[in-house]
């Protein structure tokens, strides 16, 4: 166990690929309200019935920016099947940077600025970006991703969640 903790810490410290899958009983996603750049609000409860990727990111995070085209593609390919994405900008990200990035890249999913850090706190006090949570149709977190993740494995997990 000690080796696992040290190895995992080393992977995270080096900015490598890491992901966690929740084991045993499913963990319910926290009850939060997401208010996007257009002023529309949706709660975690409102998202039940969809498979949702909640992605914590920042415009200053090179990995986040590099992942965004793939995130857009996944959303576009899967939204008709009941998949949604919410991009949550960290509280240290300047709002004008987030708005500019969202507009110039034409992000097709809701973009939320977590100005008070309440959403990050509710999801386990998120500090590192990108951190993403995959939530099933019942509102349970089925995967947590930190950093880069394997696209094939991600898509398999999403497709399985959409089918159930």
Image (cartoon, helix red, strand yellow):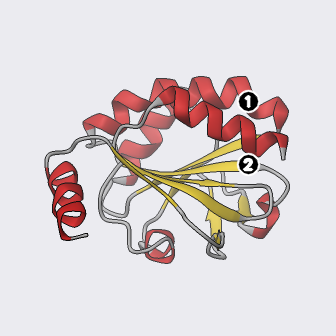
Q: Which mark is residue 8?
A: none
Drawn side of residue 27 relative to residue 5, left or right: right
Please, what secondary structure does the residue beneath circle 1 have?
helix
Q: Nearer the viewer, residue 121 or 28?
A: 28
| Coordinates of residue 63 in the picture (x, y in percent) | 30, 36
* Residue 104 can be seen, yes or no: no
Q: Residue 141 lies in what quarter of the image? A: bottom right
Whether 43 is drawn above or below 78: the answer is below
Compared with residue 85, is residue 143 higher up or lower down, i.e. above or below? below
Compared to 131, does 4 lie above or below? Answer: below
89, above or below 121, in the image: above
Position in image of residue 43 (x %, y %): 72, 67
In front: 23, or 121? 23
Q: Are marks 1 and 2 in contact (CB under 8 Å)?
A: yes
Residue 106: x percent and y percent?
56, 27
**Residue for badge 1:** 78
Q: Which quadrant, please, contains the N terminus?
A: bottom left
Front residue of 91 and 128: 128
Q: Is residue 90 visible?
A: yes
At x 72% / y 35%, what residue is drawn? 159
The answer to whether residue 39 is left or right of residue 102 is right
Q: Residue at x 83, y 40 (%)?
A: 163
> Along the horizontal axis of the image, is 1 left or right of 133?
left
Which residue has dot 2 on it?
51
User: Dot 2 lies on which element?
Assistant: strand
């Amino acid at each position: 166990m000690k080796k696992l903790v040290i190895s995992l810490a080393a992977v995270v410290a080096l900015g490598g690929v890491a992901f966690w899958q929740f084991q045993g009983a499913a963990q319910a996603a926290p009850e939060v309200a997401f208010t996007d750049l257009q002023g529309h609000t949706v709660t975690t409860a409102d998202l039940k019935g969809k498979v949702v990727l909640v992605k914590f990111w920042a415009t200053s995070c090179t990995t986040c920016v590099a992942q965004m085209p793939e995130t857009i593609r996944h959303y576009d390919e899967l939204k008709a099947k009941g998949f949604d994405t919410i991009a949550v900008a960290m509280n240290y990200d300047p709002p004008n940077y987030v708005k500019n990035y969202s507009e110039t890249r034409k992000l097709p999913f809701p973009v939320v600025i977590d100005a008070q850090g309440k959403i990050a706190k509710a999801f386990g006090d998120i500090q590192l970006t990108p951190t993403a949570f995959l939530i099933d149709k019942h509102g349970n977190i089925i995967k947590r991703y930190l950093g880069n993740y394997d696209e094939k494995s991600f898509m398999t997990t999403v497709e399985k969640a959409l089918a159930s």
